[in-house]
Image: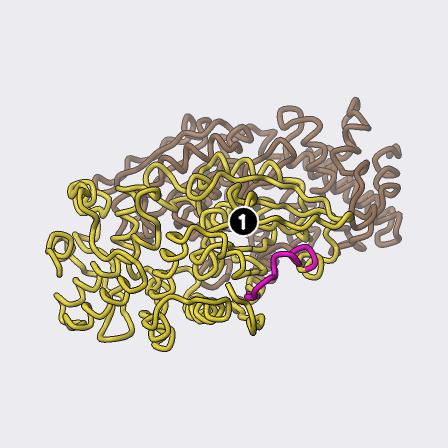
Chain colours: A yellow, B brown
Amino acid sequence: MDSAGAEPRRERVELGARSTDVRLGAGLLPHIWAAVRARFPAAARCGLAIDSHVAAHQPLPAAPADLEVLEVRLPRGEAAKTRESLSALQDAWIGLRRDEPVVVIGGGAALDVGGFAAATVRRGIPWIAVPTSVVGMADAAVGGKTAVNHAAGKNLLGAFHPPALVIADVRTLETLDPRDRVAGLAELYKCGRVSDAVLLTRLREGAPTDAEAWLDVIHRAVAVKARLVEADERDGGQRRLLNYGHTVGHALERVLGNERLRHGEAVAIGMDAAAGIAVGRGLMSDADRATQRADLRRLGLPVDVPAGVDAEALQAALGMDKKRASGAAHVFALPVGSTGARIVEDVTDAEIAAVLTAKRD
Amino acid sequence: MDSAGAEPRRERVELGARSTDVRLGAGLLPHIWAAVRARFPAAARCGLAIDSHVAAHQPLPAAPADLEVLEVRLPRGEAAKTRESLSALQDAWIGLRRDEPVVVIGGGAALDVGGFAAATVRRGIPWIAVPTSVVGMADAAVGGKTAVNHAAGKNLLGAFHPPALVIADVRTLETLDPRDRVAGLAELYKCGRVSDAVLLTRLREGAPTDAEAWLDVIHRAVAVKARLVEADERDGGQRRLLNYGHTVGHALERVLGNERLRHGEAVAIGMDAAAGIAVGRGLMSDADRATQRADLRRLGLPVDVPAGVDAEALQAALGMDKKRASGAAHVFALPVGSTGARIVEDVTDAEIAAVLTAKRD
């Protein structure tokens, strides 16, 4: 990844005392401890959670002698999002004061569980998110949603606890499995489709090829998310637009598991399903849906439900066979026209079933 | 308890979308389900956590047929504040939607763990606090601090998650162990000493003897707390005045356990210790400290560290033998003059040691 001309960028999620400063750049990780020290000058200790796979591939500089680091290695990826990992982090960090931060390094899963632990120790100690994946940078690090999984579903236990600081070093993307890097593009595309036509146009030109191009699309996606989170931190209104592709996507992840289907891949398939529902409602033309399918495929993403998925299991994961108090309605973020999206709260089981079973091109 | 003339009262903690409506009265518990239904008309289900001792002594009315109640019995008192109880509540409530509340009935301990579980399910579902103890009504139900204990200390894991509604029925105080009812008076006295001279005067006249008198002092204490929480929800400023008596109090609880020393008793002893430090600093006269000692004793509360407490264990529980990054300073809420209090951030080990070892009258 060529980082010539990759100037550091800054963004901020303005939430009063709970605001997040975001720094994006190429080559920030080697300076991580200086950044911690600058932000928390009084800290004698700091927590560290790091995805074990990341730890093996991203050498961290040694911490300064006057900073005691309470380190926990997390299982790789989604396997970290358990109550057991949460307890291990809490036990390691329980002695920290409210002015001693924790640093969480890894993809979206590590940030989810690390941020949740920080939310619960002393009712909330500050944390620094250091995302090392595209999804982590564009999505998990920004907005304060933290979580672990539960047998009943993904992310069902968690808290809103925005990090004080995000340090996103696009150099860390170089060591990603190419499949994971491509999968992450789905979250960027989603942000463009929901509210940034310039970002959408950039991604139509293909995947980023150098550090500057990565910084550019990730910064744009972070800005989209920042504005939606500022307007609706608790996710009861416009922030739900970021769920575009996630309703069907989460259900597919539950049925297939993340070994078979990456989160971003599931979101890409979910975006096409949502587009199908939008077409059925006249919110979007067939041509616009076809454009999106072509865009996603050009980026290397899947758009169809994989062959062999158990239809009944998928319907169950979508809650299509449960009685719901509010009737049989599902809430979806649906695309509108060639750009933009809206929240629709009355999608029926039949509409979902139609797009999941119809064969496309 | 005579409830003639005990008119229901209302108070509110104004925290925007996270505000708490407080209702105080005599005989509210039999109407609990109507109150739940009125506040959450769309709920098909609701969670219920109830202290097992309370459940045995406070018969609850049957829930309406159209409300499925997901009930968990909690161990009595402080024993409920564990990660195990937290997990049991999360497992029972994981299927609730964000518009389906949980009801938590019991003393401060039940409210602490029940509120924490509500904070974590789907990143926060609404909860209704139904305190059945004096401490629960005057303290735990108001302000949103929730917690469980950790081997490293009390309340070290938790969240800020204010209840949507508090229903405080002073009739439930009738079934309390008299020792617990008296212990609760310490929290009321604390609120009076910190910022309500009228409340302080009432309590100098002795413990309340009927429902109206209980409603009056509890309402005043709730109002004191509400105003401090509104000004400083996250407990970094003036809210810390409510810690008056709690620094030494918590340490005593850790050393002795709540079987030997009730929370309120520990707070009473802690208030006298803090008053001793205040006298040493010239913030308060010896006479004012003596008045407070006499007041607390008249209410039936202890003021001296019980004989046989291990001095070293107490010092360790106070963090007096630990190196702290900020030097050897402790943060205390100290009483000032005959009424009022202030936060002091530079109390030394020596000042604490002096008041813990000096013999008083």
Residue furthest out toward the bottom:
A198
In depth, the one of B270 and A215 nearer the eye is: A215
Q: Is residue B188 visible?
A: yes
| Residue for badge 1 | A119
**Which residue range is magenta in the image?**
A22-34
Quarter in which the C terminus of chain A is drawn? bottom left
In depth, the one of A139 and B355 nearer the eye is: A139
In depth, the one of B338 and A59 nearer the eye is: A59
Residue furthest out toward the top:
B308
Q: Is residue A359 above or below residue A216?
A: above
Q: Is residue B20 visible?
A: no
Exactly how many numbered labels are in the figure? 1
Q: Residue at x 72, y 44 (%)?
A: A68
Q: Secondary structure at mark 1?
A: helix
> Looking at the picture, how far across and down is residue A285, in whole percent?
15, 73
Q: Residues within 10 Å of mark 1 (few under 14, many from 20)?
A: many
Q: Is residue B48 above or below residue A2?
A: above
Residue A341 horizontal side relative to residue B144, left or right: left
Q: Is residue A27 magenta?
A: yes
Would you identify the image quadrant in which residue A96 lies?
top right
> Looking at the picture, how far across and down is residue B251, in whole percent?
72, 35
Q: Residue at x 80, y 33 (%)?
A: B315
Residue A86 horizontal side relative to residue B67, left or right: right
Q: Is residue A80 magenta?
A: no
Residue type for callout 1? Ala
Chain identifier of the residue bearing label 1 in the image? A
> Looking at the picture, how far across and down is residue B72, in whole percent?
38, 32
> Looking at the picture, how far across and down is residue B256, in whole percent?
69, 26
In depth, the one of B206 and B149 nearer the eye is: B149
Q: Is residue A335 above or below residue B286?
A: below
